Image (cartoon, rainbow, N blue to C red):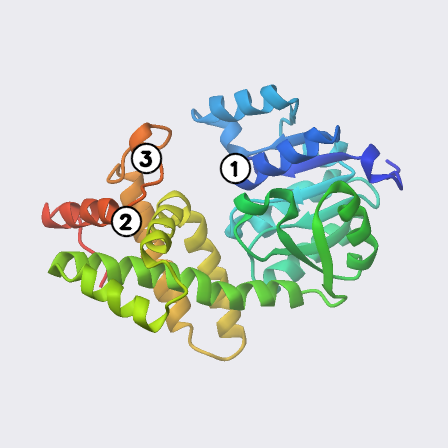
Amino acid sequence: MTVSSDPMQWQVGLLGYGEVGRILAEDLRKQGIKVAAYDIKLEREQARPLREHADGIGVELAQSHADLAARADLIVSAVTASQAVPVAEACAPAIGKEAWFLDFNSASPGAKQRAASIIDGAGGRYVEGAVMTSLPPYRIKVPLLLGGRGARELAPLLVTLGFAAKVASDELGVSSAVKMCRSIMIKGLEAMVIESFTTARAYGVEDAVLASLKETFPSVDWEKQGAYFFQRVIEHGRRRAEELREVAETVRDAGLAPWSASGTAERQAWIADLADEGVFGVRGMPEFARSADWRTEADRILARLNAGSRKAPA
């Protein structure tokens, strides 16, 4: 397969058809770009919404990782962090010669280097991409840092497709290190807000706590920020927990004990467990819609704990 020099003629293959994959698919299809996708959920009962979305915007669904890799000029890997290397392994035998492999996953520098070795060794061209903030508000224009020896060649091609891509380094692992260090702060703040606000609610002191935070950080709307953090973790805690485990590995590789990253991973995973149990309602149902008041979700957590059937992590 020869990769066209005109990215508008490419077929883009999306590995993962979750929130990130669907948003990218929508924005690429609006430009007339050919898009194919594969997600392991297509083999499960929850495949129907994914298939309906793909059919609605004209995305072809591949039968496997290899099927997707065989037809794509550019593969965008947007799966959970723990799967970054396995999906590279699954794609490598079928990847086209000099086809691009853009790794969106929130994986450690070491994992990115292993994935790059697999793809480059199979004749593809691996580039790491670090997504630097939440994708939904920005969509395809989300700030994207590229790294690796092919980053400078791929960057202008991605810009043509609508991405806000810029090169961080020719050295593989630098972009992901930036992402990992940022996640210690951002995902950690989410976990701290949930822990602080829910505890304050249990003691009936939430108004005093928020007033104190407002005095210290007057530019932050803590009511609004609290609601946003609660819902992002409820909806994406599982993925965030996996990312924080990669962050913890990154911290260990630097020689530090990852106390904050590991604790954040546990809190995010715990909230994901509660969501899976239905504490916050059923995904896809109206009661699971984002609440304008974080207190609603804190009360659900406290009610579950008070029922005695689930304990918070020690």
Along the horizontal axis of the image, is 83 left or right of 306?
right
Residue 119 % position (x, y): 73, 50
Say what amino acid the circle numbered 3 marks: Phe
Residue 283 % position (x, y): 35, 32
Q: Nearer the viewer, mark 2 or mark 1?
A: 2
Q: Is residue 171 above or below residue 136?
A: below
Q: Is residue 302 above or below residue 50?
A: below
Q: Nearer the viewer, mark 3 or mark 1?
A: 3
Task: Give the crowd class for mark 1: few <14, some 14-19, many >=20 residues within 10 Å.
Answer: some
Along the horizontal axis of the image, is 33 left or right of 262?
right
Q: Hey, which quadrant is residue 274 in on the image? A: top left
Disc 1 secondary structure class? loop
Q: Which residue is mark 1?
A: 18
Q: Nearer the viewer, mark 3 or mark 2?
A: 2
Disc 3 secondary structure class? helix
* Residue at the image point whose x is 83% and y is 33% from the top: 9
Q: Answer yes or no: is residue 67 visible.
A: no
Q: Which residue is most to the bottom?
A: 255
Q: Hey, which quadrant is residue 190 in on the image? A: bottom left
Q: Which label's residue is closer to the chain start, 3 or 2?
A: 3
Q: Is residue 197 above or below residue 67?
A: below
* Residue at the image point whose x is 33% and y is 59% from the top: 222
The Cα–Cα distance between marks 3 and 2, rounded to whole angstroms, is 13 Å
Say what amino acid the circle numbered 1 marks: Gly
Q: Which label's residue is closer to the chain start, 2 or 1?
A: 1
* Residue at the image point whose x is 43% and y is 24% from the top: 45
Which label belongs to residue 288?
A: 3
Along the horizontal axis of the image, is 267 left or right of 43?
left
The Cα–Cα distance between marks 2 and 1, rounded to whole angstroms, is 25 Å
Q: Which residue is mark 2?
A: 294
